Amino acid sequence: MSELADTPKTLHSITTGSGPRLVLVHGFTQTGRCWGEIGTQLSRDHEVIFLDAPGHGGSSEVEVDLVEGGNLIGEAGGIGTYVGYSMGGRFVLHTALQSPHLVQGLVLVGATAGLKSKEERTARLDDDETRARRIEQIGVQAFLDEWLALPLFGGLSEAAAARSERLANTAAGLASSLRLAGTGTQQPSWDQLHTLNMPTLIIAGAHDTKFGALGERMAEAIGSNATFATVDGAGHTAHLEQPEAFMALLEPWLAKHGL
């Protein structure tokens, strides 16, 4: 019997608004409440489902890998357009590949289809294990101080960082997320991207050169139904650093595809 067999398998969510459905999945150490004004604006003309990803917020006790997490997200979200940031992007990419009948549209922000080499994945597994132990050692609040101080998040204002919402996470939940669904665990899906037939929008901050390059490669691998765009003046957390510019990309794309 799997040691995870008795863990919860239902994700916590909050639903607001009415209209075409959008399912939003946040990044590591966040919760569904961290979308801020973007979520408020989208709910004016959409039904928006804010999911707490496995290991986070109200789903802290859900301990699953990216494959099972992608399935749980599809079960919780149903038929709609899936929007995922960073870790959330990796989750919803799995949802789209595993359950394309549920995903009418796909939006990936600062995401990847996986590290290609075994050496890269092994190194990342080691890094994430170190981070998991660090969380368990010092607790969520101290870890967030270190995490949000990384250059990756240098463009975030204190308000946009939503630190109080992130404190809803648990050390055990975040550690399990890293160990089970960290980037090092992700099996590369580059050779499957061409099977994604739904409209796909891939976004990266203009200053986030690493994920900008990954985003361009992903769009090229998907094909003509994919669009790649950058948010000026933004880094990895493009949607939170420059929400107006982000929405200026997202909303016309949604309208164009009737989503």
Image (tube, grey):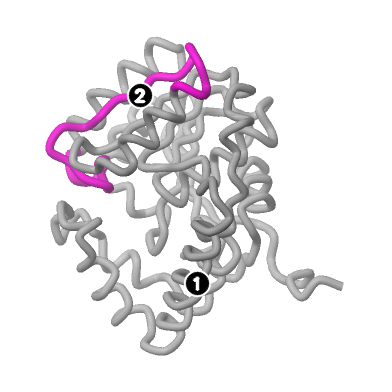
Task: Please provide percent x and percent y for residue 177.
Answer: 53, 65
* Residue marked by disc 2: 228
Task: Please provide percent x and percent y for residue 216.
Answer: 37, 28
Point 71% across, 70% down: residue: 7
- Judged left or right of residue 215, residue 5 is right
Q: Quadrant of residue 18?
A: top left
Separation (CA) of disc 2 from disc 1:
31 Å
Of residues 191 and 158, the one nearer the viewer is: 191
Task: Please provide percent x and percent y for residue 142.
Answer: 29, 82
Q: Quadrant of residue 31?
A: bottom left
Element type where label 2 sits in the image: strand
Q: As displayed, is residue 257 above or below residue 8? A: above
Point 52% across, 78% down: residue: 172
Categorize mark 1 by other alpha carbons within 10 Å: few (<14), some (14-19), many (20+).
few
What residue range appears in magenta?
220-242
* Residue marked by disc 1: 126
Residue 178's disc number: none
- Sequence-wise, the earlier of marks 2 and 1 is 1
